Amino acid sequence: MHTSDIVIGLEIHVQLKTNTKLFCSCPTEAVEPNTSICPTCLGHPGSKPVLNEKALEYGTKLALSLGCKISPTVMFARKTYFYPDLVKNYQITQYEVPLGSNGQIILEDKKVVRIERVHIEEDPGALIHEAGSCLVDYNRSGIPLCEIVTAPDLTSPAEAREFMKKLMQILTYLGIFDQDTCIIKADANISIKEKNYTRVEVKNITGFKEIERALNYELQRQKQQEVKKETRGWDADKGITISMRTKEEEEDYGYIVETDLPIFEISQEWIRKVQQTIPELAEQRALRWMKEWKIDEDDARIIATDLDVAVLFEEIARKIDPILTARWTRREVLRLLNDKKKELRETEFNKEGLTELFKLLVEKKITDRIGQRIIEQLAEKKFSPIAYVKEQKLEMVAGEDILKKACEKAIAENPKAVEDYKKGEEKALMFIIGHVMKATKGTAAPNVVKELLKGLLK
Ligand code: ZN
Ligand code: MN
């Protein structure tokens, strides 16, 4: 049985970024409700589904990237249940034979999370609850989804979050998912040892931040309350899970083979062709930087996590010192994105500005402190750091005599600090350094100032 106190398994649904729906040619992007619809995605009698090859290709691409074995036989099934958003009273999915099976995702600490299956299926419509009534938008009916089912290998809410983040990163690198328009949703099974591993399913968790929140809540609830086998829904607004129903079993869905779609074989050659379209993923990229450019492992991995940042970094690093570029990308660019809670494309950061700035730093024309000030502004507006530094006279004070004068002045103006320093107070020296830095508008290198002051105060 389980060895961990907490056991979590995930079923994740991802919308694939195709132009048209899974079984008809309706566009996947529509603005007005119920405008991207046809007899097939509305389930009219006599309409017949036709498989979108792009969706099959995208699903295969994902399954291959997750290390899955691809089934040469492709077949679909009808999963029967009643819900107002489901036009045919069944969802076309894959049941008997999934597209991919036996894959894995490896987490940061090298832990392996097994992936049992990857299959494609159609999305139902969307229910919109509004002022006491319920509306249905069928634009979503028939949008292609990829479902990824993990083994119950996750052992904490934080790990579930990391898994989802990693999955999203792979999807983005593959270009089959759009973070702005596509939806990623998870249903999570969670059980704890204290309650005899009684399984509860939590449905409808959107995004990787929510998964940690939802599972943390459910974990605390299970510790405090009696746990019964059931399905609960995650209410993101209230931050709680709510009982929906006692869990139905797979057999309750009465799966039957979808006879409107042929069972067919995909060739090894087709699979190979799809394999060739898979780009270099984050891990491989990081390894290449470490090997070719001797980038620090942590820096490389963290930069590679975000595809946009990775591309930007690589373009700059090709032109100037990759190690300095990596350090500044990680410590400053990523830190600023994190502080601002923004994606790279939501800022003004660009290749030209950052290249100029890093060049100034490589050539030691400015101090790190000035560099930090400029990079903060580069996030907000486009400008030339080289011109700016010249204009504002921010070049590093090179002449030691100028610096020495500034130090002597600072000593003369701060007798109390000098006295404290001489009594052995290190902090007092920092105070005098601060004074010099202020007087030189941050253009002096702090370590040089420190040495100069130490010499003068001997
Ligand atoms: Zn349609
Ligand atoms: Mn599903």
Image: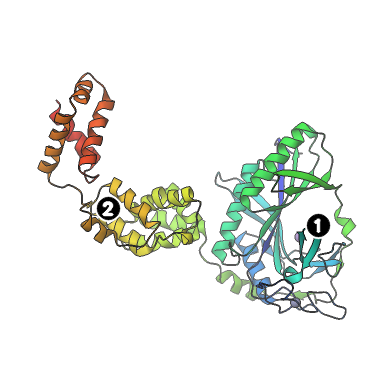
Please, which residue is most extreme toward the left here? 401
Residue 445 lies, with reference to residue 358, above or below; the image says: above
Which percent across, then down, holds residue 250? 85, 55
Name the residue beneath numbered marker 1: 132
Distance from disc 2 to disc 1, alpha carbons, whole Å, reads 61 Å
Residue lying furthest top in this view? Answer: 423
| Most foreground residue, 309 or 26 | 26
Mark 2 or mark 1, earlier in chain: 1
Ligand 2: quadrant of the figure: bottom right
Query: Is the residue at mark 1 in contact range of ligand 2, meaning its CB lies under 8 Å from it?
Result: no
Q: Quadrant of residue 350?
A: bottom left
Q: In the rendered structure, which amino acid carries the disc numbered 2?
A: Leu
The answer to whether 202 appears left or right of 60 in the picture is: right
Which quadrant holds the N terminus?
top right
Q: Is residue 4 above or below residue 271?
A: above
How crowded pointer 2 is (Cα within 10 Å; few <14, some 14-19, many 20+) is rated as some
Left or right of 286 in this view: 205: right
At label 1, which amino acid type do we have?
A: Gly
Label 2 sits on residue: 361
Helix, strand or loop at mark 1 = loop
